[in-house]
């Protein structure tokens, strides 16, 4: 099943200086495959398209 995730953060909590956007998700989460990632970086919004068998797996993906 495909999921579209919209992730936002404030400018004060922007991960740009602390590892970048890849620190906002767990790439090794079991049962989730990242299909695409798009950013509206000046608006501090990131969109992920992931494939997963369950919502619980998506939760693990979003829990770095």
Image (cartoon, rainbow, N blue to C red):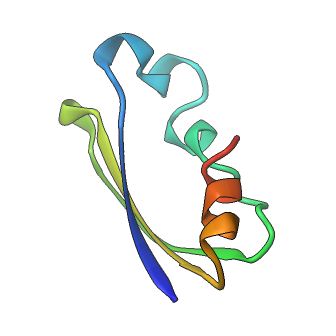
Q: Give x and y (percent) for residue 37.
A: 41, 62
Q: Residue at x 51, y 17 (%)?
A: 17
Q: Residue at x 62, y 37 (%)?
A: 23
Q: Is residue 48 above or below residue 17?
A: below
Q: Residue at x 68, y 66 (%)?
A: 56
How many numbered markers are drawn? 0
Task: From the viewer's perspective, tell me whether residue 50 is left or right of residue 33.
Answer: left
Task: From the viewer's perspective, tell me whether residue 61 is left or right of residue 29.
Answer: left
Q: Residue at x 67, y 74 (%)?
A: 32
Which image quarter: residue 28? bottom right
Q: Give x and y (percent) for residue 35.
A: 50, 77
Which image quarter: residue 13? top left
Q: Give x and y (percent) for residue 58.
A: 61, 64
- The residue nearer to you, when weighing 56 against 28, is 56
Task: From the viewer's perspective, tell me whether residue 29 is left or right of residue 52.
Answer: right
Task: From the viewer's perspective, tell me whether residue 21 is left or right of residue 8.
Answer: right
Q: Residue furthest bottom?
A: 1
Q: Is residue 45 above or below residue 4?
A: above
Which quadrant of the figure contains the C terminus?
top right
Q: Give x and y (percent) for residue 39.
A: 30, 50
- The residue nearer to you, when weighing 16 against 62, is 62
């Amino acid at each position: 099943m495909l999921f579209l995730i919209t992730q936002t953060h404030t400018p004060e909590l922007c991960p740009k200086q602390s590892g970048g956007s890849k620190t906002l998700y767990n790439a090794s989460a079991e049962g989730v495959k990242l299909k695409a990632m798009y950013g509206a970086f000046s608006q501090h919004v990131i969109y992920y398209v992931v494939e997963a068998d369950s919502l619980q797996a998506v939760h693990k993906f979003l829990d770095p």
